[in-house]
Image (cartoon, rainbow, N blue to C red):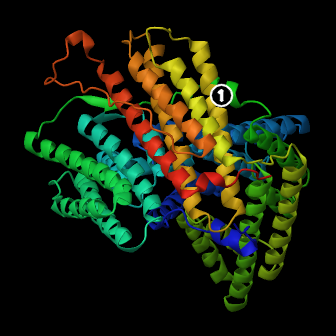
């Protein structure tokens, strides 16, 4: 394993996470122009600059890839928090102590939102960026009521984005449901989509299609790991099956989105037969047959749902909800709001660094101070390694931006440079957040081009110096103030995460011998959350440190996502217990789940494939079975237990392939 150098890190860190958002960028720029025209018409000349930038921020929030039922409350929260941020800065003009109070408050609590999730933390960062903008823009020319009016106007203009979202809300949901059937979708992405869909009423068909797609995604990732260890004819046969299965899966995704005909699976049947024949010749190929059969079965089940919908053609009013994560405010704070959590330490460092930087802005309103503070804002991260990575990306792209700005300044006259600057603002929106390096480059060129005084060369040189000073301050804060240096024993951390999940299961799933205890369940959940965050940090440490570990990272990310999903599904059963519902005795199922998790933890610790503990699929609740009415499970519980059973099956597959591939022999002692 070779450690990454500068260029290796830059290459990995600059990798895009999606496609440029050209359409969103065009619409955002049009909305910004519209907001400026309305502000000018209303005589709000002193607030035009503020209205333009807040319109862009509001558009970014509303354009988040979430269902409209979740975007609306998020936009309302964004509006309220932005108004409060500008009012805070307006009130702070009267007193330095008030300014310090608000700055510490906004910087610490905005960044501490990372303890809830990466998505919530990113939203908190956007909110703090609004506070930063308010410190830069707010002056005594307008009252705090005026600043509130500017923000409300910006959000009202940006809210026009809700019109297409309302018109396409069913299409958007169908795209989310279909996403697991696309071959490029990872299990981690599916889990993210699952969180997006949680709590939203879905048709029973869509609910079941998404559940099946989740496990198809899991087996697709698992199959890629198996394929990497095959060679010769075996590899060729299995590769053909996977290619055929992926094409059929993509057709199913298209059928889900368009609600059209079912998909012919004869080609998958043929390739499955080839895999079966290969197993007869080479018994060691048996693991691939199990994967192929599972994927074939999942595709067939999904296709049958589409066929059934086509034949019945009923507009069913029955709605099902994917259970929401059981992360209550009290539970999350109890588990994470302490100095053991790297994000809380980060929030403290961030609050100190930003208070110092913003204090200089407050006292001087110097441009250099603004950009030094901006350097801190965009570079400081929760741990030393991530901060260094951010320095590499941000400084590299800023340096390129400066060279580009100087070149453009030599070629074009000043009035053209202003238009180029606003073109760069368009590119910033198009590249944010999927091409972070290019978005930083575009924003830097924009600032250099539209800066009111000085030549392009002077502005360029000043910006690179300011950002560099901010980067140095960010690094010093990350390195000296409660540093988060991650010590990694990755196999042990995986086993520990599985064990805390096992403990959580024991306190949630009902049995004849135990009764549900809220305090014990909360305590177990907190323990699991802590270990999950430790696992996430450990995986990032490996990714940031070594070259050529993509296969191992794929395995570890699958472990992380699969454990999160199991905990979420167990939490769903916990919500039934919390509601006071009288749950039946499922002692046998509970025992099988805990035994399976214990066996997996031991396998990981010993790096030996142990015999799998048996776990049965939940008996289906259907009118065709012979169970008595009292023996049938409540519909919600039945669905949740089926999810849990599938989670366990997939985790067992992961443990076996991780051991056979040798992934669990590595990363046992990383400082």
- Residue 582 lies in what quarter of the image? top left
Vertical order, 43 against 83 (above or below): below
Residue shown at the point (80%, 40%) measured from the top left: 345
Residue shown at the point (37%, 27%) measured from the top left: 641
Q: Is residue 559 visible?
A: yes
- Residue 196 lies in what quarter of the image? top left
Q: Is residue 446 visible?
A: no
Vertical order, 367 against 408 (above or below): above
Q: How many marks?
A: 1
Residue 476 is situated, as x and y percent measured from the top left of the image, at 89, 55
Vertical order, 518 against 650 (above or below): above
For the residue carrying disc 1, how many other residues have a C-alpha within 10 Å: few (<14), some (14-19), or many (20+)? some
Q: Which corner quadrant holds the N terminus?
A: bottom right
Residue 367 is situated, as x and y percent measured from the top left of the image, at 84, 63
Name the one closer to the observer, 117 or 94: 117
Residue most toward the left? 311
User: Circle 1 sits in a helix, a strand or a loop, which is it?
Assistant: helix
Vertical order, 178 against 512 (above or below): below
Residue 143 is situated, as x and y percent measured from the top left of the image, at 73, 41
Residue 597 is situated, as x and y percent measured from the top left of the image, at 52, 32
Residue most toward the bottom? 411
Name the one closer to the observer, 255 or 665: 665
Name the one closer to the observer, 371 or 14: 14
Q: Which residue is mark 1?
A: 527
Residue shown at the point (83%, 77%) measured from the top left: 461
């Amino acid at each position: 394993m070779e450690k990454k150098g500068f260029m290796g890190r830059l290459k990995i860190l600059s990798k895009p996470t999606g496609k440029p958002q050209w359409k969103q960028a065009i619409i955002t720029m049009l909305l910004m122009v519209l907001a400026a025209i309305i502000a000018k018409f209303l005589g709000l000349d002193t607030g035009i600059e503020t209205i333009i930038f807040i319109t862009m921020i509001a558009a970014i929030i509303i354009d988040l890839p979430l269902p409209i039922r979740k975007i609306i409350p998020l936009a309302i929260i964004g509006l309220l928090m932005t108004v409060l941020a500008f009012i805070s800065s307006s009130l702070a003009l009267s007193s330095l102590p008030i300014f310090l109070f608000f700055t510490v408050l906004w910087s610490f609590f905005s960044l501490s939102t990372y303890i809830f999730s990466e998505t919530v933390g990113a939203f908190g960062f956007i909110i703090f960026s609004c506070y930063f903008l308010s410190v830069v823009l707010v002056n005594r020319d307008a009252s705090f009521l005026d600043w509130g009016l500017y923000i409300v106007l910006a959000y009202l203009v940006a809210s026009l984005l809700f019109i297409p979202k309302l018109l396409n809300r069913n299409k958007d949901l169908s795209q989310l449901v279909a996403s697991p059937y696309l071959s490029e979708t990872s299990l981690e992405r599916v889990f993210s989509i699952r969180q997006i869909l949680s709590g939203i009423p879905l048709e029973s068909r869509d609910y079941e299609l998404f559940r099946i797609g989740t496990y198809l995604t899991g087996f697709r990732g698992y199959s890629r790991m198996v394929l990497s260890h095959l060679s010769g004819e075996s590899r060729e046969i299995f590769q053909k099956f996977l290619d055929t299965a992926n094409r059929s899966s993509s057709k199913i995704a298209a059928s889900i989105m368009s609600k059209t005909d079912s998909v012919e699976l004869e080609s998958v049947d043929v390739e499955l037969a080839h895999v079966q024949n290969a197993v007869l010749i080479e018994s060691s190929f048996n693991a691939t047959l199990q994967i192929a059969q599972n994927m074939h079965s999942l595709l067939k089940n999904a296709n049958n749902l589409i066929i059934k919908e086509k034949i019945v053609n009923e507009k069913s009013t029955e709605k099902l909800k994917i259970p929401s994560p059981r992360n209550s405010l009290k539970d999350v704070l109890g588990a994470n709001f302490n100095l053991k959590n790297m994000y809380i330490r980060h929030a403290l460092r961030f609050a100190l660094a930003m208070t110092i930087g913003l204090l200089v802005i407050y006292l001087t309103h110097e441009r250099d101070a603004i950009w030094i503070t901006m350097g801190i804002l965009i570079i400081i991260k929760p741990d030393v390694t991530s901060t260094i990575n951010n320095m590499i990306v941000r400084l590299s792209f800023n340096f390129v931006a400066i060279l580009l700005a100087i070149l453009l300044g030599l070629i074009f006259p000043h009035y053209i440079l202003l238009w180029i600057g606003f073109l760069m603002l368009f590119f910033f929106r198009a590249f944010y957040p999927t091409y972070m390096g290019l978005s930083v480059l575009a924003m830097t060129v924009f600032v250099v081009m539209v800066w009111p005084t000085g030549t392009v060369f002077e502005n360029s040189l000043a910006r690179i110096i300011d950002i560099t000073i901010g980067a140095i301050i960010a690094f010093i804060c990350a390195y000296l103030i409660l540093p988060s240096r991650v010590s990694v024993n990755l196999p042990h951390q995986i086993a520990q995460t599985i064990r805390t999940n096992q403990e959580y299961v024991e306190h949630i799933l009902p049995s004849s011998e135990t009764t549900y205890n809220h305090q014990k369940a909360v305590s177990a959940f907190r323990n699991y959350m802590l270990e999950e965050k430790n696992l996430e940090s450990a995986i990032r440490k490996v990714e940031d440190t070594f070259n050529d570990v993509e296969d191992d990272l794929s395995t570890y990310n699958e472990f992380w996502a699969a454990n999160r999903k199991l905990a979420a599904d167990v939490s769903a059963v916990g919500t039934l217990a919390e509601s006071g519902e009288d749950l039946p005795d499922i002692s046998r199922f509970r025992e099988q789940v805990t035994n399976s998790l214990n066996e997996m933890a031991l396998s990981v610790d010993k790096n030996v494939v142990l015999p799998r503990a048996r776990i049965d699929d939940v008996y289906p609740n259907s009118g065709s079975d012979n169970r008595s009415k009292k023996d049938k499970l409540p519909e919600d519980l039945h669905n949740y237990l089926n999810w849990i059973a599938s989670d366990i099956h997939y985790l067992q597959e992961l443990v076996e392939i991780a051991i056979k591939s040798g992934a669990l022999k590595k990363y046992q002692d990383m400082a």
